[in-house]
Image (tube, rainbow, N blue to C red):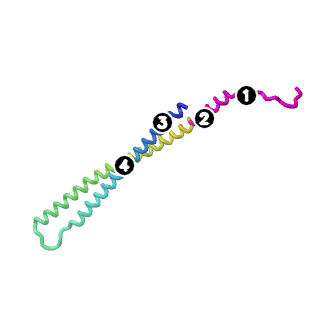
Amino acid sequence: MIAAKRWKRIQTVRAIQRQIAELQLSRCEKDVSSLADLGQRIALIRNTAVASTGLENSAVLRAHCELTTRLDGAQAALAASQNKAAEARDRQSTAVRDAKQREMAVEKIAVSANADAEKRASERQNKSRIFRKTKVRGSGV
């Protein structure tokens, strides 16, 4: 019975570990999606910031070039961050899978331990039972 309680506690801990891993995975997925959204917004700004046709002075052209250069730099920096976030998400996905496997393994052991405990309890109960000999009727004795 003690072993069954122990495995039940371990099973509870494994379930909590899995839940924490899933929470961290959802945070990683949120980071990846927010970085992707940011990349799309930067690309949209970059694509809409085109030089107008017609006469422009050099200050306007210089400002436009500076803006596009900064946006290109931001996209390049964002690409590295997106790669790191995607790698973190993949690692966390693996951690969730491993946590689920550990939880299922402990669950199987807990079920087996409970079955063994019930079997031993039944055997102890059968051993403590008083068996009486029954008289056989009609034997003439």
Q: Is residue 76 above or below residue 129?
A: below
Residue situated in front as seen by the camera: 31 or 64: 31
| In this rendering, the label closer to the viewer, 1 or 3 | 1
Residue 118 shows which numbered tag? 2
Label at residue 89? 4
- The type of residue carrying mark 2 is Glu
Residue on which the image places disc 1: 131
Quadrant of the snapshot with the N terminus: top right
Residue for badge 3: 9
Inter-mark Cα distance, 1 to 3: 39 Å
Give the residue drawn at x 15%, y 73%: 54
| Among the two numbered marks 3 and 2 on one chain, the one whose residue lies closer to the N terminus | 3
Quadrant showing the C terminus:
top right
Mark 1: few/some/many CA within 10 Å (<14, 14-19, 20+): few
Tell me where residue 6 appears, x and y as whole percent: 50, 33
At label 1, the amino acid type is: Phe
Q: Which residues are drawn in magenta?
A: 114-141
Label 3 neighbourhood size at 10 Å, few (<14), some (14-19), many (20+)? few
Mark 4–mark 3 distance (CA, rounded to whole Å): 29 Å
